[in-house]
Amino acid sequence: MADVPSIKGSAFQSVVEDVKRLIDAGALDPDEVAEQLSDKDRGYLDAVVTPVAWLPIASYGRMLELLAREEGGGDPIGYLRTRGARAAERLLSGSYSGFAAEPGTWGARVGQTMLGIGKLLYNFTEWTFREAEGGAFEIAVDQAAAYPETARHTAHGFLQWFAERAADRPMRVESARPSPDRIVFRIQAA
């Protein structure tokens, strides 16, 4: 999958599990799923998704869209950000625990550590970190044209959870896509 923009199975697994849960519970009609997901996407619902596998980010994005529509109610973006925070908690206490930061350690060094997570989870983006004016920090994701908007919102929630744990205080995160190939997250004390 080196030539296909992809995400690690460790992040993809929960999306597959949640879509399957909704189908099994009867909350998602299989015909509706067939309309919204490609044959390839639906194939992942029957496959074993391993944490180290690379899976297409486009499939991940379409499944997130389906979940946000079904479970997000009137606030699909809030739903996606909450998913991202839960993913941060799950991954940073499990597979990626080496990236967890001690409370009260927020700053440039911890921000650089956050970049390592992006490099491990995605095979197609370039993440950079810089201190910005006003005590803020920015994380830019370049080469991000294939990065779905749904994934931008889950990454927003992930980064907010991570920054708040590292800072040991509320943090404000803003995210934007100033061009199709670039996403910028701005993080500062609330």
Image (cartoon, rainbow, N blue to C red):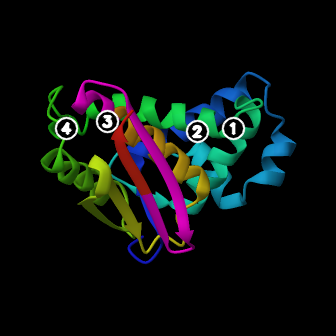
Which residue is tagged 1? 76
- Amino acid carrying label 1: it is Pro
Of mark 1 and mark 4, the one earlier in the sequence is: 1
Evaluate if marks 2 and 4 touch, with contact meaning CB atoms under 8 Å apart: no
Which residue is tagged 4? 106
Instruction: Give the residue at x 25% y 49%.
Output: 114
> Quick one: SS at disc 2?
helix
Q: Residues under labels 1 and 3: Cα distance? A: 21 Å
Which label sits on residue 167? none
- Amino acid carrying label 2: it is Leu
Residue 48 visible (yes or no): no
Q: Is residue 166 magenta-colored?
A: yes
- Amino acid carrying label 4: it is Trp
> In the rendered view, does 12 fall on the left or right side of 101?
right
> Which region of the structure is painted magenta?
162-184
- In the rendered view, would you say 142 is above or below 7? below
Which residue is tagged 2? 80
Which residue is tagged 3? 162
| Residue at the farthest front position | 134
Which corner quadrant of the image does residue 10 belong to?
top left
Evaluate if marks 1 and 2 touch, with contact meaning CB atoms under 8 Å apart: yes
